[in-house]
């Protein structure tokens, strides 16, 4: 084949993927939920990225260890401390920024792990069927009925303080069954489609059928569920931290709320109580909105075609 | 065409049966047994287009799926070039599938929506480890042209949903012939397409036979398309093969009442009222006491009660190379072989 044809074909392939991406992106942005969700997420992303700046300006802005020597108790907003300080003189604004970083870290990594696990289990169960299916799904049922927060609380009480990564791992391990059920259902229906038969006639092995033919069809769904899992992971981590079982070495929004409550500033210092609370609500809301908008990209039936013209 | 064709048998089905069991439950016990294919004997000659004709539910698709080994026969033997392939497994099955490929009925379902045309067509090459990726692209382009998609370069990097039904079916044909199989099973490849597309698909299939020397098993419900395309025709009714012979003979001089009924059912151009030529189909099914009799007894207008209801009909030689399974052809000689 001539060099020109190959170049031409490569350009065509790039164009195809670009076109596909742009199409989906347009549908996504047409959805008001998607627009709000993505703007909020960009804002939180910027907060997380900026969390490294305050400690560099002055060590007293370090969210965990930095203490303003002039402050002896919690004070309100000022030019020095935009959102005020906590009971020992730490800057609340820089804590809030660090909390955004932790929320992303916990949310995305726990969701990613649980979705990877859930997808693997779901595809295996759905494709293999019979005994494997029954065994894996009953296991999923058993884990699904365990109240995550309660079990993690008990484990935390047993083993003392858990590190943030242990908490992430725990959330991931308790949160995969929901994903795996959905992926299994999807796999069961895909397995019956003629293109799987066609692949088999083409000589494809089971592994190839799973990875090349079933996985690309369930991945969008898995990705969608990942956004919802992020939400639940953040809420669980915040709940744990607020109840006093969080990682004591990490400043998360749940941790900030716990400090407010523990030091009796609940109704005395709204500048301290409100920002982390609002941030938790907004970040879960924005991931949820992102998921809803993605739902529409993945399922053309949900699209409002009157807008498309 | 018939002059240059050798009479070498490429594929043979010997008394092949396939049963399905409907799902039972705890209270009713085991399910009911449904016979999809009942002791089918068939042989395909190298280089011919063999039409398997029957109504829906007659088992013709099951027959095709048995041949490409998407399902396994419960009884009987299938041989390709003399080699038993009925229960092949693993590596041998994969080798077998290099020679036998299939085109599916529904082009909207038989292509993976998430895979580009190039990757779909190249799949058999990749799984069978034929050539390098660069070779693959070259062969994909060539085979797409053979299947009537040109310029092929415009189609390779598209997704199935960007193509029309006819174009998708061409892609499916391209995928089936990219390995240059010796046998191609085409399972109603035109039933989901417009009539104008059908003729083009038929031409492509004919081209595949003429240029590649592939044998084609063409499964259809339409006598008209079987007549257009096939060299020989087998008529199948509820899992029983009832008539077999050269296409011209079977259509111009059908012998079995069911074949006649099928020809009656073919829409005729320019005729508003239905005037059956043969009138062998009973308007209402008649009850049958035993299942031992002729499979077509319930719907046959000509059936004689005692004989047809009670005993399974014998094969009769009704013309050169034409055989039919019927009691009523008494003056014809018993058939020597049914294959």
Image (tube, rainbow, N blue to C red):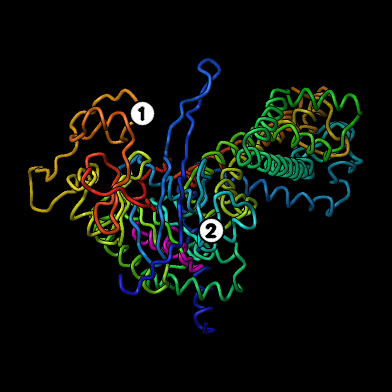
Residue bearing the label numbered 1: B291
Q: Residue drawn 81% across and 36% down?
A: A85
Q: Chain of mark 2?
A: A
Q: Position of residue B63 (x, y in %)?
A: 43, 47
User: Where residue B226 sits in the image (x, y, percent)?
Assistant: 28, 56
In front: label 2 or label 1: 1
Query: Can residue A56 be seen in this snapshot?
Result: yes
- Which quadrant of the figure contains the N terminus of chain B? bottom left
- Compared to residue B336, the image places residue A147 above or below, namely above
Where is residue A109 shown, x and y percent of the image?
73, 44
Circle 1: element type: loop
Query: Would you call the spot at circle 2 few (<14 residues within 10 Å), some (14-19), or many (20 or more)?
Result: many
**What secondary structure prevails in the magenta region?**
helix
For disc 2, the marked residue is: A202
Give how far across and how far down residue A118 sits, in percent: 67, 39
Q: CA distance from mark 2 to mark 1?
A: 39 Å
Query: For the image shown, how many numbered marks are present on the structure?
Result: 2
Rate crowding at label 1 as few (under 14), some (14 to 19) or many (20 or more) other CA atoms within 10 Å. few
Query: Does residue A300 sit above or below B119 in this rendering?
Result: above
């Amino acid at each position: 084949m001539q060099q020109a044809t190959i170049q031409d074909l490569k350009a065509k392939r790039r164009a195809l993927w670009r076109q596909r991406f742009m199409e989906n992106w347009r549908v996504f942005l047409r959805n008001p939920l998607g627009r709000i969700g993505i703007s909020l997420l960009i804002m939180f992303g910027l907060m997380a990225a900026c969390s490294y700046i305050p400690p560099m300006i002055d060590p007293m802005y370090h969210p965990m260890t930095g203490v303003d020597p002039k402050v002896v108790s919690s004070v309100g907003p000022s030019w020095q401390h935009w959102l005020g300080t906590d009971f020992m003189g730490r800057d609340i604004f820089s804590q809030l920024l660090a909390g955004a970083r932790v929320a992303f870290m916990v949310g995305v990594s726990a969701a990613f792990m649980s979705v990877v696990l859930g997808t693997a289990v779901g595809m295996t169960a759905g494709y293999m069927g019979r005994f494997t299916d029954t065994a894996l799904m009953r296991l999923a049922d058993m884990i699904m009925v365990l109240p995550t927060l309660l079990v993690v609380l008990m484990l935390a009480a047993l083993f003392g303080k858990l590190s943030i990564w242990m908490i992430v791992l725990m959330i991931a391990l308790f949160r995969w069954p929901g994903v795996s059920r959905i992926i299994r259902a999807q796999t069961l229906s895909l397995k019956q489609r003629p293109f799987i038969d066609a692949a088999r006639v083409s000589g494809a092995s089971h592994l190839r059928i799973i990875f090349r033919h079933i996985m690309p069809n369930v991945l969008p769904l898995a990705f969608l569920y990942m956004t919802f899992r992020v939400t639940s992971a953040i809420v669980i981590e915040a709940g744990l931290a607020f109840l006093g079982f969080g990682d004591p070495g990490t400043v998360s929004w749940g941790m900030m709320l716990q400090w407010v409550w523990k030091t009796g500033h609940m109704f005395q210092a709204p500048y301290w109580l409100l920002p982390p609370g609002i941030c938790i609500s907004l970040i879960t809301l924005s991931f949820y909105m992102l998921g809803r908008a993605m739902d529409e990209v993945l399922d053309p039936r949900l699209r409002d075609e009157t807008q498309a013209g | 065409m018939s002059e240059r064709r050798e009479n070498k048998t490429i594929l043979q089905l010997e008394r092949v049966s396939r049963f399905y069991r409907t799902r039972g439950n705890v209270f009713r016990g085991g399910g009911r047994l449904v016979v999809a294919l009942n002791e089918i004997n068939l042989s395909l000659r190298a280089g011919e287009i063999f039409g398997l004709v029957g109504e829906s539910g007659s088992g013709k698709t099951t027959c095709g799926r048995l041949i490409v080994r998407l399902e396994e026969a419960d009884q009987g033997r299938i041989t390709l070039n003399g080699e038993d392939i009925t229960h092949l497994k693993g590596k041998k099955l994969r080798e077998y599938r290099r020679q036998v490929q299939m085109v599916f009925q529904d082009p909207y379902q038989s292509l993976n929506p998430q895979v580009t045309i190039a990757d779909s067509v190249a799949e058999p090459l990749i799984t069978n480890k034929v050539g390098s990726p660069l070779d693959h692209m070259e062969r994909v382009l060539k085979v797409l042209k053979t299947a009537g998609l040109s310029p092929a370069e415009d189609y390779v990097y598209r997704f199935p949903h960007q193509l029309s039904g006819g174009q998708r079916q061409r892609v499916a044909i391209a995928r089936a012939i990219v390995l240059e199989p010796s046998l191609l099973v085409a399972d109603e490849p035109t039933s989901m397409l417009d009539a104008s597309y059908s003729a083009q698909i038929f031409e492509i299939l004919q081209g595949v036979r003429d240029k590649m020397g592939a044998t084609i098993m063409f499964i259809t419900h339409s006598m008209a398309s079987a007549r257009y395309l096939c060299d020989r025709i087998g008529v199948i009714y509820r899992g029983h093969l009832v008539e077999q012979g050269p296409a011209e003979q079977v259509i111009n001089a059908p012998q079995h009442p069911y074949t006649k009924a099928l020809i009656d059912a073919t829409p005729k151009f320019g005729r508003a009222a239905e005037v059956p030529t043969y009138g062998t189909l009973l308007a209402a099914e008649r009850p049958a006491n035993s299942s031992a009799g002729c499979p077509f007894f319930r719907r046959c207008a000509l059936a004689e009660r005692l004989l047809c209801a009670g005993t399974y009909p014998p094969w009769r030689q009704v013309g050169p190379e034409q055989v039919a399974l019927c009691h009523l052809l008494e003056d014809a000689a018993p058939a020597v072989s049914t294959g």
